[in-house]
Image (cartoon, rainbow, N blue to C red):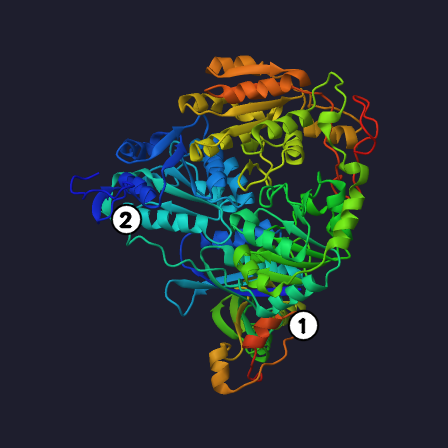
């Protein structure tokens, strides 16, 4: 920073126009945008920026692989709603970010990725560590910038933050040439303010639509609210709750919607879709009205479009007009911010008696609802469901749980009852294995006072396990539960159900995770029985530093119920009446 | 159905890729795409013609608006509009065989813009079918077509299509043709009869 800078504002922001290098402009703009933490990995083309970093009040978390940086920025954003920031160098550094960027894109996570680029003089010459990262990330970013002049940096970065936050949020990448980092320019944070956010021109709530929606809700006999990720993105938890309570409408949740409506609420049906409970999917199939709130009728949620909720009129409230009629044709589309639309809709909704429909749904639960796994006889086997149940019970459901992708993810969704928003962090759209550990680091950096649990399978955990070192370096108290069944479990389950049990390439030899943790200086323990389970979880929580629990669970357990891909929502594979591995009540 | 999108986009590097990449991602083939300067400084005008379902038309338009560099998108699909295409056609012709071609060119209201000892070049502006027609008769007349260069469609809605101008004119809306965006038509649809 130049010496002519006035006293910085409390957060260290530079408030008067000042001549700075591009590198300084980068961090000064980030500080001005409210950034306090970034996740990154240095390298040649971003070195000028790293050289300037120590002058700014920004915590830099050194990752072990750039994919970790983008997942951490993602986890940070999901835990707080703020924009997460990842930094990487050019070439391989930048391409390593791509999986994390795509993950954020599919789940609409606000993120800004800053990458170094070779000098503008050699752009396009296949210079050392050069890659056209704006070209590479074109389909997986909301927008991206190549900046080759220091004076363009602050406007580009501020615009990037605006794009990442606005409308349907998403990742934005800013690629900065090395010479732009080294050159100087006048930094004026206020003058670099982007033009006012221009909402999508096809985004307008029509008065007629609201009237029509209210009419449909008033007349519905069997309505269901479908609550998606947009409920949290828009901060519409209260509005959705008001709608549900006022009109006595049960609420079904998508995976990313979990936490958006309290799990303990009597109107909460639970998760819908491929691994949703039978009564939830049946209710949707039997419904005469679906009110989709901030969700996009993903194929994992609808089964097949041609068989989905055929008896139901559909109201779709969604911020992205491109989602309207994309997967499911709807009757009324209310395009706009969910909270705002519901605010407009709510006054038109009066008390409604929904008891008959609620009773019907309740009756359909029957024996299926008997899922009190803690009362099952101890067969000597440890089931992942037991682990999830105890994690929920012992943490009081208050922890932030960051899951990886696979069977454990679905068990988590089924057995950990999320009461509050932003307590389940999981890769829904892209289904990115290796997401959990780095995303949990991001969440813990964002929320140091919250209890954070990683729930990962033995497969996904190995994709990013080097980030254990990041946990140690940053002295983070993160608890890790590896659900270890010796298989790529979900793939094995598909092989069991649809490929004649041809377990090709799914048996998985893993390192001793306890020793792996130990090598990193992380306390760890293996858990083999139900008897040891609760004690081990308590011990991990009580331990001062990070703690890893290696749960050696039943190898060939499956996630039930399951709707085979391409089947209708009600055509599910139910829990076996008698599990060959353990005696279970019928049809649960 | 055939969609014709007219879009105003930032005149910046990479914008064409962003727009065309959207069609690639949706696995929709672009039949023609023309870009050039518009009446607004810093903005280019694109005319993109593609074949897709009516529902896809809505989604394409909405998705195009999601691109940061796209300012305006209009789906002309079936609405009253003037569409033109420019074609340059080089035909083999010696001084002995020129005159029938000259006659054809006259009939099609095209022009000869280059004459060489063994070839000539025809410039023609018109709707797609008219250009196809000229190419067809040239071929049927045993002429050897050496090169064809076509610009792709350029389209502009007929009349003044802003509602402000409409009101000033006191003109009522005209019913949209099949497939045209209803709301768009209702707002913008008054038209002067074709020539």
Residue beneath the point at 49% across and 19% down: A543
Q: Nearer the viewer, residue A216 or A521?
A: A216
Marks 2,1: beta carbons within 8 A: no
The tag on residue B178 is 1
Give the class, few, some or many, for how many residues have Cα within 10 Å of label 2's Cα (few <14, many ≥20). many
The tag on residue A151 is 2
Q: Secondary structure at mark 2?
A: helix
Q: Nearer the viewer, residue A23 or A313?
A: A313
Give the class, few, some or many, for how many residues have Cα within 10 Å of label 1's Cα (few <14, many ≥20). few
Among the 4 quarters of the image, the one containing residue A52: top left
Residue A307 visible, this orientation: no
Q: Position of residue A224 (x, y in %)?
A: 70, 53
- Image vertical order of residue A116 relative to residue A217, above or below: above
Quadrant location of the N terminus of chain A?
top left
Residue A292 visible, this orientation: yes
The residue sitting at the bottom extreme is: B170
């Amino acid at each position: 920073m130049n010496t002519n800078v006035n006293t910085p504002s409390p957060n260290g922001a530079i408030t008067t126009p000042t001549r700075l290098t591009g590198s300084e402009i980068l961090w000064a703009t980030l500080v001005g945008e409210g950034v306090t933490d970034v996740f990154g990995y240095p390298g040649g083309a971003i070195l000028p920026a790293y050289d300037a970093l120590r002058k700014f009040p920004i915590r830099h978390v050194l990752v072990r692989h750039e994919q970790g940086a983008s997942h951490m920025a993602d986890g940070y954003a999901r835990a707080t709603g703020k924009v997460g920031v990842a930094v990487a160098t050019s070439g391989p550094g930048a391409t390593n970010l791509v999986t994390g960027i795509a993950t954020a894109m599919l789940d609409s996570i606000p993120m800004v990725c800053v990458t170094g680029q070779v000098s503008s003089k050699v752009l396009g010459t296949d210079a050392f560590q050069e890659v056209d990262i704006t070209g590479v990330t074109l389909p997986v970013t909301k927008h991206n910038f190549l900046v080759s002049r220091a004076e363009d940096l602050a406007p580009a970065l501020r615009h990037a933050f605006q794009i990442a936050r606005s409308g349907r949020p998403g990742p934005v990448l800013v690629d900065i040439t090395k010479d732009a980092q080294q050159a100087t320019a006048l930094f004026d944070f206020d003058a670099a303010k982007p033009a006012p956010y221009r909402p999508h021109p096809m985004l307008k709530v029509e008065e007629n639509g609201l009237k029509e929606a209210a009419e449909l809700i008033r007349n519905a006999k069997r309505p269901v609210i479908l609550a998606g990720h947009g409920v949290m993105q828009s901060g519409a938890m209260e509005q959705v709750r008001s709608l549900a309570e006022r009109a006595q409408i049960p609420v079904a949740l998508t995976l990313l919607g979990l936490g958006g409506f309290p799990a303990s609420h009597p109107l909460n049906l639970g998760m819908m879709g491929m691994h949703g409970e039978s009564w939830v999917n049946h209710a949707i199939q039997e419904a005469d009205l679906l009110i989709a709130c901030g969700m996009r009728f993903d194929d994992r949620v609808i089964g097949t479009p041609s068989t989905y909720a055929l008896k139901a009129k559909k109201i779709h409230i969604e911020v992205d007009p491109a989602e309207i009629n994309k997967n499911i044709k709807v009757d009324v589309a209310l395009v706009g911010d969910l909270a705002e639309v519901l605010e407009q809709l709510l006054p038109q909704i009066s008390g409604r008696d929904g008891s008959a429909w609620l009773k019907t749904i309740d009756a359909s639960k029957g024996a299926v609802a008997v899922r009190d796994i803690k009362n099952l006889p101890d067969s000597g086997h440890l089931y992942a469901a037991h682990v999830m149940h105890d994690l929920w019970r012992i943490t009081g459901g208050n922890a932030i749980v960051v899951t990886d992708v696979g069977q454990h993810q679905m068990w988590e969704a089924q057995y950990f009852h999320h009461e509050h928003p932003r307590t389940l962090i999981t890769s829904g759209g892209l289904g990115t294995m290796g997401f959990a550990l780095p995303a949990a680091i991001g969440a813990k950096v964002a929320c140091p006072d919250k209890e954070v649990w990683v729930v990962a399978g033995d497969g996904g955990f190995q994709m990013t396990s080097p980030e254990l070192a990041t946990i140690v370096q940053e002295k983070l108290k993160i608890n890790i539960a590896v659900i270890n069944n010796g298989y790529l479990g979900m793939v094995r389950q598909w092989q069991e159900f649809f490929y004649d049990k041809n377990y090709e390439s799914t048996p998985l030899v893993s390192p001793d995770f306890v020793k792996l943790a130990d090598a990193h200086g992380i306390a760890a323990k293996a858990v083999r029985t139900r008897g040891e389970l609760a004690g081990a979880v308590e011990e991990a929580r009580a331990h001062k530093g990070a703690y890893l629990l290696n749960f050696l669970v039943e190898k060939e357990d499956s996630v039930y119920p399951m709707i085979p891909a391409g089947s209708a929502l009600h055509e599910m594979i139910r829990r076996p009446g008698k599990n060959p591995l353990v005696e279970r009540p019928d049809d649960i | 159905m055939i969609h014709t999108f007219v879009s105003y986009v930032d005149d910046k590097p990479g914008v064409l890729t962003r727009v065309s990449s959207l069609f690639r991602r949706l696995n929709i083939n672009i039949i023609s795409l023309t870009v050039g300067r518009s009446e607004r400084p810093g903005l280019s005008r694109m005319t993109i013609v593609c074949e897709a379902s009516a529902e896809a038309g809505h989604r394409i338009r909405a998705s195009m608006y999601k691109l940061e560099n796209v300012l305006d998108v209009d789906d002309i699909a079936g609405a009253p509009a003037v569409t033109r295409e420019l074609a340059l056609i080089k035909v083999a012709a010696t001084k002995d065989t020129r005159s029938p071609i000259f006659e054809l060119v006259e009939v099609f209201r095209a022009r000869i813009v280059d004459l060489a000892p063994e070839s000539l070049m025809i410039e023609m502006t018109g709707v797609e079918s008219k250009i196809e027609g000229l190419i067809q008769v040239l071929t049927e007349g045993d002429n050897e077509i050496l090169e064809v260069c076509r610009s792709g469609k350029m389209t502009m809605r007929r009349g003044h299509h802003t509602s402000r101008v409409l009101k000033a004119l006191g003109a009522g809306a005209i019913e949209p043709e099949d497939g045209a965006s209803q709301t768009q038509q209702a707002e913008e649809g008054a038209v002067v009869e074709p020539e």
